Amino acid sequence: MQQLGRIDFLINNAASARGEDRVPVVDLDLDAWDLVIRVKLRGGFLMSRAFARELIKNEREGAIVNISSIAGKRMGPNSGAYSASNAGIQALSSSMSGELGPKGIRVNTICPGVIDTSRLDDLGRDKRWQAVIQGVPMRRASDGSDIANMAVYLCSEQGNWINGQAINVDGGSMTSH
């Protein structure tokens, strides 16, 4: 606030690295679970709370966009912590939208599908990657610009009537089953 003078929107886009949490729940280490939940869900809560408090204090409107994942809706095997953290951020967004909407603060969630970044390097870019891409109706991954464009829209005047939504930006993946 001292540096910029005011804030208009918040985008929560944190997640822990893929790794030791991608195992069956019966094998999931508690520290790995806690890390995933702490980074995505607790971090999103803390940032949203601080942002909303500042806007309310200054009687300003604004927007919160939480970046989740379709994993929070799909909830696949060997991703219990990741899926739970994303479903949790979707639930938190929904709850906050009802609380903060009357104060002029919109809260929405973007649920990306497959994004071609280093986060998915453990899949490689051969047969396993191609199998993932074949599961996307548009037969391609996003480069991430689709997510950025949706975030800009949700924070803009054009998106001022959208509140409490969990929007899939996923090449049609969630409608393919």
Image (cartoon, helix red, strand yellow):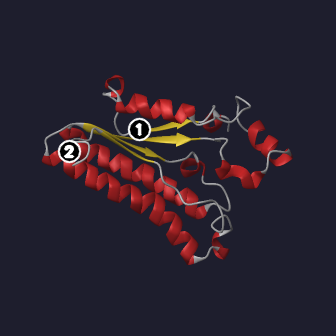
Residue type, numbered disc 2: Leu
Q: Where does residue 116 sit, x and y in percent of width and height?
A: 67, 41
- Toward the right, the furthest residue is 127
Residue 112: x %, y % from top left: 56, 41
Q: Where residue 147 sits in the image (x, y, percent)? A: 52, 35
Image quarter of residue 79: bottom right
Can you say whether 43 is above or below 175 in the image? Answer: below
State how far apart marks 2 and 1 are (Cα): 21 Å
Which residue matches tag 1? 165
Residue 40 versus residue 176 in the image, above or below:
below
For label 1, the SS is loop
Q: Amino acid at mark 1?
A: Gln
Q: Nearer the viewer, mark 2 or mark 1?
A: 2
Residue at 20% over, 49% down: 54
Choose top left, top right, bottom left or bottom right for residue 166.
top left
Query: Where, by quadrant of the figure, is residue 82 drawn?
Result: bottom right
Residue for point 65% across, 45% down: 117
Q: Secondary structure at mark 2?
A: helix
Relative to 81, is 154 above or below?
above
Q: Badge 2, how many Cα within 10 Å: few under 14, some, many 20+?
A: many
> Considering the image in quadrants, where does the C terminus appear?
top right
Residue at x-position 75% and y-position 43% = 132
Residue 96 drawn at (x, y percent): 30, 48
For residue 15, the mark is none
Residue farthest toward the top in the current orientation of the protein: 158
| Side (left or right) of 65 relative to 5 | right
Identify the disc placed on residue 55: 2
Q: Earlier in the sequence, mark 2 or mark 1?
A: 2
Crowdedness near tag 1: few (<14), some (14–19) or many (≥20) residues, C-alpha within 10 Å: some
